[in-house]
């Protein structure tokens, strides 16, 4: 290589070194876009569920609202999945429904981290995690316990006899009681192939 062309190569390398930081941002921008999309999908369901629970409890009592968390939540999650292409689940370290709500390793790590952070004073509403895992994008958002949830997830001695009986009948392995307000009941977990 003559001096001229090796100089040219040096120049190219120098230009590339300067240019790379300017080329890199789009990758971050698209990460932001997918995080925003995941967050939007994950935040569609919980407010609708809360409204449905409130309405049903007011109208017919807490026991009658069990189908809202039992049947309506998975049905609505299925509909949102169909509309958006994201898989949606609710999982918990103390699952009520063993068939649907047992977290995998990635979700377990996020749930344990959220519990620690909530205990240390972080606002549970804000706890979320999103990242690429293998060929998927995964995102979880904490579902904090509000006073409304205590009807069915509070300390067993405070549950009404009707709720206790219904839960015992449907969920013989129920672990989802004993919560207090502000704790994390579980997460809504969404994932999509990239
Ligand atoms: C009327 C009773 C009732 C109320 C009130 C209620 N839940 Fe539930 N919850 C249930 C039942 C029943 C299930 C099991 C659903 C199933 O079979 O998949 C459940 C399941 C869940 C799950 C899925 C994980 C698991 O353990 O199976 C989450 C998360 C959850 N509830 C969060 C909440 C939150 C947060 C609130 C308050 C905003 C709330 N629930 C209020 C009855 C209730």
Image (cartoon, rainbow, N blue to C red):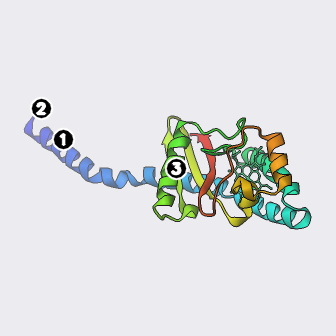
Q: Nearer the viewer, residue 131 or 58?
A: 58
Residue shown at the point (70%, 37%) measured from the top left = 98
- Label 1: element kind: helix
Q: Position of residue 189 (x, y in %)?
A: 62, 47
Which of pointers 1 and 3 indicates the residue nearer the eye? 3
- Label 2: element kind: loop
Q: Residue furthest left?
A: 3
Label at residue 1:
2
Label at residue 130:
3
33 to the left or right of 51: left
Judge whether 68 appears above or below 146 on screen: above
- Residue 71 visible in the picture: no
Find the distance from the CA under tag 1 to the CA under tag 3: 40 Å
Viewport quadrant of the N terminus = top left
Work out whether mark 1 precedes mark 3 in sequence or the reverse, and give the earlier one: 1
Residue shown at the point (57%, 48%) measured from the top left = 139
Judge whether 92 appears above or below 33 on screen: above
Q: Residue furthest top?
A: 1
Find the distance from the CA under tag 3 to the CA under tag 2: 49 Å
User: Can you tell which quarter of the image residue 154 is in?
Assistant: bottom right
**What residue does disc 1 label?**
9
Near mark 3 (Cα within 10 A), the count class, few <14, some 14-19 or many ≥20, is many
């Amino acid at each position: 290589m003559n001096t001229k062309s090796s100089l040219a190569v040096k120049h190219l390398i120098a230009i590339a070194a300067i240019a790379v930081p300017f080329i890199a941002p789009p990758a971050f921008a698209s990460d932001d876009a997918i995080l925003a999309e995941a967050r939007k999908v994950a935040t569609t369901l919980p407010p609708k569920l809360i409204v449905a629970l409130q309405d049903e409890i007011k109208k017919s009592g807490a026991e009658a609202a069990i189908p809202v968390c039992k049947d309506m939540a998975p049905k609505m999650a299925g509909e949102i999945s169909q509309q958006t292409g994201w898989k949606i689940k609710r999982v918990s370290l103390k699952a009520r429904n063993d068939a649907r709500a047992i977290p995998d390793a990635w979700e377990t790590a996020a749930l344990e981290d959220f519990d620690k952070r909530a205990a240390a004073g972080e606002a549970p509403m804000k706890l979320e995690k999103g990242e690429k895992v293998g060929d998927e994008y995964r995102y979880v958002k904490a579902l904090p316990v509000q006073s409304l949830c205590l009807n069915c997830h509070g300390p067993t001695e405070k549950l009404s006899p009707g709720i206790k009986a219904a839960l015992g009948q449907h969920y013989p392995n129920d672990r989802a009681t004993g919560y207090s307000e502000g704790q994390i009941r579980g997460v809504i977990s969404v994932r999509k192939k990239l």
